[in-house]
């Protein structure tokens, strides 16, 4: 998680803090590592879900986390595509900067909801319903 | 100062400053945990990515571009120190005797010494290196930094799994 969020933070901060028409040379090369981290998130997330499915699936915070995580990953993909298409004289548009800012907000929401999952569940095991 | 005195001092500080009350409120602990993780992401996203670049990843990125993000990493570090102190002082007995916490502190010390060595001996060279490959000694510093921060994350997660009676330390 820290790897994925970390790389997104680096790219987003660089996009938001650069005012010159410079590009972000090579920043798109960080994305293979980012997607590797995303695979780890997916595998560990599925394992945790399989371990306590009722705990997660009965908690609305879980759905908020998944929604913000998926949206943040889609935005990461969009930013990656824009970085790969950019040339040396590219000036990043307001929409790219808005995407970068939105991505930061979504990662904060993902982190908060992820931590709050441990404190907001009302059901631990499905056997409670039998 | 004995162990009990240290714990009493930390607990007293928490009570005196109101940290204890806040941390034991309904959402105090998870909010501070979330902030701790955000600080960690800021650190890893700036210092960690800078380390990876020095090790040879994404060769087209000039080092100074990533170094400009380091102040955000420092902000993340300050968030983590502040929130970390809030955890420690609220439940000092859960941390002082905890081997995962002690190991985490050792790696933080290593990361700190490593950072001093970077700014003492490597920073000037890296700033002027453009996108050229760096010498092995600087890559070693970057590697140690990456290992130390990764170990800090792992130890941080393990703290919660070392509760009494699994506490252990050299002086206990």
Image (tube, rainbow, N blue to C red):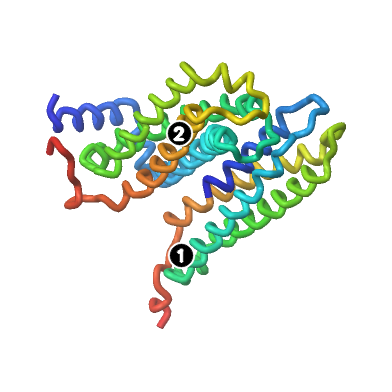
In percent of the image, x 33 and y 38: which residue is there?
A: B104
In this rendering, the answer to whether A52 lies above or below A70 is: below
User: Residue at 51% across / 62% down in the picture?
Assistant: A45
What residue is rendered at 12% in x and 39% in y?
A: B172
Q: What is the x, y in percent for residue A43?
A: 52, 63
Label 2: which residue?
B145
| Chain ID, mark 2 | B
Name the mark on residue B96: none
Residue closer to the observer: A65 or B20: A65
Closest to the observer: B145 or A124? B145
Q: Of residues A112 and B96, which is closer to you in this image?
A: B96
Return the x and y of residue B16 as percentages of the image width and height: 29, 26
Q: Quadrant of residue B6?
A: top left
| Kind of element beneath mark 1 | helix
| Extreme-bottom residue of the structure | A130
Q: Position of residue B57 (x, y in %)?
A: 61, 40
Q: Is residue A77 above or below residue A8?
A: below
Q: Residues within 10 Å of mark 2 (few under 14, many from 20)?
A: many
Quarter of the image with the C terminus of chain A is bottom left
């Amino acid at each position: 998680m820290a790897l994925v969020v970390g790389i997104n933070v680096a790219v987003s901060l660089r996009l938001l803090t650069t005012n010159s028409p410079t590009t972000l040379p090579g920043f798109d090369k960080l994305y293979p590592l980012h997607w590797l981290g995303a695979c780890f998130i997916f595998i560990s997330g599925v394992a945790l879900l399989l371990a306590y499915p009722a705990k997660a699936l009965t908690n609305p915070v879980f759905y908020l986390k998944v929604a913000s995580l998926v949206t943040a990953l889609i935005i990461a993909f969009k930013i990656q595509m824009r970085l790969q298409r950019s040339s040396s004289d590219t000036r990043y548009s307001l929409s790219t900067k808005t995407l970068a800012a939105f991505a930061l907000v979504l990662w904060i929401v993902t982190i908060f909801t992820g931590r709050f999952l441990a404190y907001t569940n009302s059901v631990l095991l499905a056997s409670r319903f039998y | 100062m004995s162990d009990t005195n240290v714990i009493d001092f930390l607990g007293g500080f928490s009570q005196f400053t109101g940290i204890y009350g806040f941390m034991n409120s309904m959402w105090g602990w998870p909010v501070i945990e979330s902030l701790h993780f955000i600080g960690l992401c800021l650190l890893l996203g700036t210092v960690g990515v800078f380390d990876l670049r020095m090790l040879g990843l994404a060769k087209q990125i000039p080092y100074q571009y990533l170094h400009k993000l380091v102040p955000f990493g420092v902000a993340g570090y300050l968030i983590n120190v502040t929130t970390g102190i809030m955890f420690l002082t609220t439940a000092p007995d859960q941390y002082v005797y905890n081997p995962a916490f002690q190991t985490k502190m050792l790696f933080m010390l290593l990361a700190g010494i490593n950072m001093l060595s970077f700014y003492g001996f490597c920073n000037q060279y890296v700033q002027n290196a453009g996108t050229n490959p760096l010498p092995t000694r600087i890559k070693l510093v970057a590697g140690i930094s990456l290992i130390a921060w990764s170990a800090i994350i792992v130890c941080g997660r393990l703290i919660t799994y070392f509760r009494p009676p699994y506490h252990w330390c050299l002086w206990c």
